[in-house]
């Protein structure tokens, strides 16, 4: 793609990064006047990805409750290209 920024460079001997994928249909209310997803909706899309990741690796809201653990989002960074 050319725009990928390496926020977490890998080091020799480290395991491969964990990955999860999800699909989301763009709804009419999420687009602006030029038919692009409005940037203010991006965190909602990231939440869908976080849920897919948690489902794949056992880090669901239910698992956090059962283990009396909290994991709030304390920082979010988005590069707009």
Image (tube, rainbow, N blue to C red):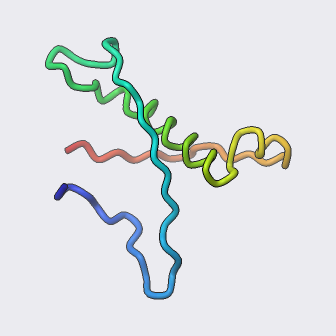
**Residue 80, quarter of picture:** top left
Identity of the residue furthest to the bottom in this view = 12
**x then y, percent, for residue 21:** 45, 47
Q: Please, is residue 2 above or below residue 32 in the view?
A: below
> In which quadrant of the rendered view does residue 57 lie?
bottom right
Residue at 34% across, 12% down:
29
Quarter in which the N terminus is drawn: bottom left
Q: In the rendered view, does 65 fall on the left or right side of 30?
A: right
What residue is drawn where x is 77% and y is 45%? 63
Q: Nearer the viewer, residue 65 or 76?
A: 65
Q: Determine which quarter of the picture holds residue 8.
A: bottom left
Q: Position of residue 25 (x, y in %)?
A: 38, 25
Residue that protrudes farthest toward the left in the picture: 34
65 lies left or right of 7: right
54 relative to 28 in the view: left or right: right
Residue 65 is situated, as x and y percent measured from the top left of the image, at 81, 40
Image quarter (top left, top right, bottom left or bottom right) of the C terminus? top left
Q: Give coordinates of residue 30: x percent, y percent.
A: 33, 18
Q: Could you tell whether 6 is left or right of 3 in the image?
A: right
Q: Is residue 19 above or below residue 69?
A: below
């Amino acid at each position: 793609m050319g725009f990928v920024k390496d926020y977490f460079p890998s080091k020799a001997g480290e395991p491969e990064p964990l990955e999860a994928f999800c699909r989301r249909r763009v709804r009419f209310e999420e687009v602006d006047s030029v038919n692009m997803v409005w940037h203010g909706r991006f965190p909602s899309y990231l939440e869908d990805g976080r849920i897919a990741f948690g489902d794949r690796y056992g880090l669901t809201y239910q698992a956090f409750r059962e283990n009396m653990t909290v994991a709030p989002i304390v920082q979010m960074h988005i590069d707009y290209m």
